[in-house]
Amino acid sequence: MITDTHAHVFWTDFDADRQAVLERARAAEVSRMIIVGTNPDTSAQAFALCEGQTGLHPSAGIHPHDAADHGEDSRELIRELCLRPACVAVGETGLDWFKAFSPREAQVANFRWHLQLACELELPIIVHCRDAHLDTLALLREFSGVRGVMHCFTMGERELAPYLELGFYISFSGVVTYPKNIDNRAAAKVVPRERLLVETDCPFLAPQGQRGKRNEPALVRSVLEHIAHVRGDDFTQLARATSANASLLFGLPDL
Ligand SMILES: [Zn+2]
Ligand SMILES: [Zn+2]
């Protein structure tokens, strides 16, 4: 059993064939997916999509790109969703200095609010970090005891250590399969097995071979194959281990 810990299957990219996408995932043994919200609307869509579907689990949060567009009302909607029993995590949220669609102050305030909520509700947090390594660490360190995952970890071995020290899980995406990303592969090789997760971040970041096309949960299989190869691990054992990690972090029921 494989768990895609970060999928945006609610987006319009999947409107034409959403059920077929989910069936293809299950046929590829990707029987569990975390459906990650990015603002109040998409978070509500994530919850609606997961309702009554075995193996689908929603989260709610405001993405750093959207931080400037959302104030108190949106936060109240996110809090309501996070309080529902189905919710497995707060996020995604975090800092993105690369695209910088929202001003830095708005992103920081947004991230801090989510960190507080995760601590208060004792839920894990799904962190998006792009070109904002040191600022992300500084904020995480403000909230002792916060648990979570560095989603789509694209950095190297050197940046990895402090997140492991904080007890965070590290999730790799299709980026790890791209030939030039030697540092990212080096990180995937040394992450302790009990902290390793895999994801698609679909519809983005399709693995090498499908690169540039729409990504979907079934393709997390090739991310896992690639990491197993890099680490010299057995594929089936690594699939089991990363799924067990996802169960532990997100409090998922057994399938
Ligand atoms: Zn992200
Ligand atoms: Zn995402």
Image: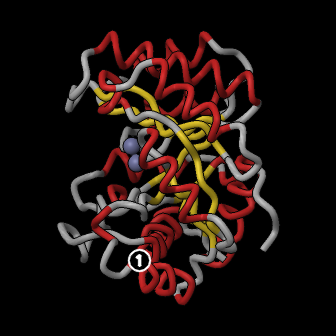
Tell me which corner region of the image, top left, top right, bottom left or bottom right, holds residue 201. bottom left
Q: Residue at x 68, y 55 (%)?
A: 246
The one nearer the camera, 198 or 120, is 120
The one nearer the camera, 226 or 132, is 132
* Disc 1 target residue: 18
Q: Residue 92, image x and y in percent?
A: 48, 39
Q: Is residue 58 above or below residue 22?
A: above
The one nearer the camera, 249 or 61, is 61
Q: Which quarter is ligand 1 in?
A: top left
Tell me which corner region of the image, top left, top right, bottom left or bottom right, holds residue 84. top right
Identify residue type, mark 1. Answer: Arg
Q: Residue 148, image x and y in percent?
A: 63, 36
Q: Is residue 187 visible?
A: no
| Horizontal relation, residue 112 to residue 32: left or right | left
Q: Residue at x 52, y 16 (%)?
A: 112
Q: Is residue 87 above or below residue 199?
A: above
Q: Residue 217, image x and y in percent?
A: 45, 71
> Label 1's element?
helix
Q: Residue 132, image x and y in percent?
A: 34, 23
The one nearer the camera, 59 or 217, is 59
Tell me the quadrant of the picture where the N terminus can be found: bottom right
Q: Residue at x 46, y 39 (%)?
A: 40
Q: Residue at x 22, y 69 (%)?
A: 211
Tell me the quadrant of the picture where the C terminus can be found: bottom right
Q: Is residue 109 visible?
A: yes
